[in-house]
Amino acid sequence: MTTLINPEAPVGAPLGKSSRPRDALFAGISRGSGIVVLIVMGAIGVFLLWKALPALSANTASFLTTSPWFPDDAQPKFGIAALAFGTLLSSVIAMVIAVPVGIGVALYTAHYAPRRFAPTLGYIVDLLAAVPSIIFGLWGLQILMPNSIGLWRWLDDHFGFIPLFSNEQNIYTRSIALAAVVLAIMILPTVSAISREVFAQVPPGHIEAALALGATRWETMRTAVFPFARPGMVSAAMLGLGRALGETIAVALILSATFKINWQVTEPGGNTFAANIALKWNEAGTIGLGALIASGLVLYIITFAVNMAARLVVERRRDFSGAN
Amino acid sequence: MAKRIDVSHLNIYYSEFLAVEDVSLAVAPKAVTAFIGPSGCGKSTVLRTLNRMHEVTPGARIEGKILLDHEDIYGADIDPVNVRSTIGMVFQKPNPFPTMSIYGNVVAGIKLKKRTKRSELDDVVESSLRGANLWEEVKDRLDRPGSVLSGGQQQRLCIARAIAIQPQVLLMDEPCSALDPISTLAIEELIHELKQSYTIVIVTHNMQQAARVSDSTAFFNIAGTGKPGKLIEMNTTANIFSSPNEKATEDYISGRFG
Amino acid sequence: MAILDRTISDDDLHNLLSQRKLPRWTTLATSATAIAGSALLSFFSPVSGVAGTAVFAFLLFIVLQTGLSFAVEGKRYAIDRLATTLLLSALTAALVPLVSILLTVLIRGLNAFNASFLTSTMRNVSPRRPGGGILHALIGTLEQVTIAAAIGVPLGILAAVYLVEYGNRSRLARAISFFVDVMTGIPSIVAGLFVYTGFILTLGLQRSGLAAGIALSILMIPVVVRSTEEMLRLVPRDLREASYALGVPKYRTILRVVIPSASTGIITGAMLAVARVTGETAPLLLTTFLTQSINTNPFNGPQASLPIYVWDQIGSGTPASIDRAWAGALTLILLVMILNLSARLIARASRVK
């Protein structure tokens, strides 16, 4: 609909009193608020780096490749290798669990559940997202941990030939594996909600086309839904990953913090960037704080990159959407 | 391929709502039958019962019989999935699968049914695309996505996809509504060729198209909003357009309503 | 034009169209068999426990059903059934933890949850002994979240206004929109680190409720921007143009016409954002100090909060403290749920209008 009015042009109030300064002021405030977003994102990086520098320069060990964490010693040495290892491993395991389950739930809600129940179902799964992370930590510690010992032991007994599942200490608590399971439950609603949205957006014409060719329900999903939704599912997975990487409290409560790189995930011990910061913060000295800030900067960079990639995947697909 | 369809006392429901009432008609093999009528009269709804697409909508059902040759396609042990691969459909808005290549689109239906060797697939792709009068235009770019084609070409691709699985009948739901006149002409010529091998039922809101393309025509009408649609009259196209029996038919044909 | 012309006999046609299907009661029968079989097996090797037996029964069910379906219905339907079963299991897998968490919080929380819990503090309460309460933490959380909302909601709304009313696909607007999305993924502890390094270390702000509020506001802003943006875009263009046509300046149109008409949605979005940050613990760890007494001054001194209270009680580890932790968790979940439900009720109430 063509408009003869250009909203950008200043429109004077009826009796000639110009509102241009007020319009400009308001526009400026709005734009300023938007710019605040950009400023904050940049400022985070700047301040973290600035306050981390003293500790980084005092460090006598290699920051990126060593593991021990003694920043408040006379000769400070601290490295993030074990932190990076724990963060990545627990998050990847969490993804391996949460992505298939989340996509399954989303697909069921979007295309299998009777239409009457679908919104309720979606709402219930989204409830998981509303549970604060400290409650996940408490539940993981008190309920899941004692009840999962049987599972880890079973894995050790029957699949122990794979180093990942073997457990030499025969202690199955406070492990990365447990943390990963709790992380998986926490990121499930994220993966599920985004996937559900994409699944629901598949043009009905494509689904009809598949059905009209004589496809069973699952074959219709494979032919019409998944190919269309693939970028969205990738984005959902990456956003889930981002969430898992940054999760602090649940992991801090569950893991018994150690600074070793240990592939045997059902054994106790391990640490992540975020959990380490939470646990060491209040006892840290000046260099200690600086070291934690430095590790926080690394975490920020990693999650920033993952989130950016997740958004870019969906941006690019818009050109290929086939929604023409 | 080419079978006759006999519809007997078909009533179409959406849950409790009767959408189409008591339709009985015969579709002749190797010929084109057109369904015409004003919007909302139920012609598309009837079409979609012929390949059991209607029941995809929750709560949708029918009463009555629809026979493909002698088989009631709504019989107790008949599978709608199999019906749909035997009675193919082309839709109003061309809907090739956007992430698949042209080649992939054509073989999409075949791959569902069974594993086929690449060389056999190649043959089917060529014969289906030839059958849809699209081969010459796309033979050098079979691996490009379906979305690079024009609207008319996309629709012919959908036709190729439909005939690749060798259906008995081809249903076409306003296949040219979304197309420009030149593409429409191309499709109409194609229909003329296809009817040598298939039974075709076409729904169209364009009377002139029905007159050009079909051998028999069925006219549907609806008494008012909320009332069920009905079959008013069916006859050879020539008769329907020159000497219709019912007044409603004549009024529609001469444009007094529609 | 070479299209094969096969004619099909009547028998062939019937075979083409028909499909052997398993009877409806099959699923029930197969599950019963699987459960029975698994139970029997666990009788002989009692190692597995309830969970193990359940998992084994599930696997047995899948094998039986898929095998049966493959034999009777053929490969395509066997796969179709398997897919449906797996999807349903995914759903169950998602619901079991949810139910477990909610039930546990309720059951264990009620141990220590009572009127006195809500109205007393931890002042002079030994960690080993039961008793004490959460009032100081409740007050702290309410104040901190209010500060967060006071900062985050206006900023978020104004940023959304910029994106919708002024931005117009400009590079700045697209950059802001993109980074708002990225901002949704900031780990909450990084927000705490930012406030610590940027405000506490650099500007000399004290560790206080205010610092916590600022950190929480950073987490709120992207959520508020997104939901407000959505609501503003829903306001029909005609409304704005009618206002301009009457000579109303743009800023007044936005303030008096656009925002009010989207107000319900904006409020709902803001409340949901508040509910989101209420449970955040990590930023509070870095920006506040816990105290066991009430401090109603968020600008000065240590101030408790619900999540840190729970964290602290878990840390104490005694049975009495763990009871208090669960009760604190229950309080927290109730607060979050009240906020969520209120938001939805407001949304629904306005829709009915």
Image (cartoon, coloured by chain):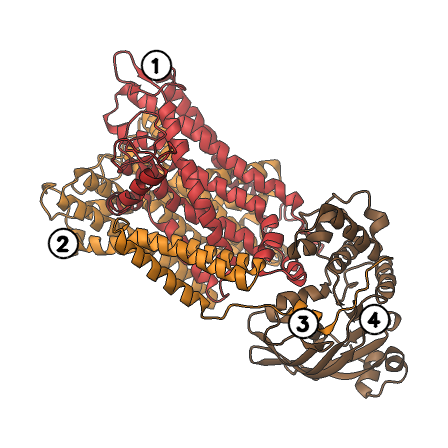
Chain colours: A red, B brown, C orange
| CA–CA distance in space, label 2 to label 3 | 76 Å
Residue B75 or residue B258, whichever sits in front: B75
| CA–CA distance in space, label 2 to label 4 | 85 Å
- Residue C14, label in figure: 3
Residue designated by label 2:
C116
Mark 2, secondary structure of its residue: helix
Amino acid type shown at disc 3 = His
- Residue A59, label in figure: 1
Give the residue displayed 16% in from the left and 38% down from the top. Answer: C316
Residue A244 or residue C39, whichever sits in front: C39
| CA–CA distance in space, label 2 to label 1 | 50 Å
| CA–CA distance in space, label 3 to label 4 | 20 Å
Pointer 4 local density, CA inside 10 Å: few below 14, some 14–19, many at least 20? many
Q: Is residue A215 left or right of residue A115?
A: right
Amino acid type shown at disc 1 = Asn
Q: Nearer the viewer, mark 1 or mark 4?
A: 4
Residue A16 or residue C223, whichever sits in front: C223
Q: Is residue A324 above or below residue B233?
A: above
Q: Is residue A4 visible?
A: no
Chain to which mark 2 belongs: C
Residue designated by label 4:
B30
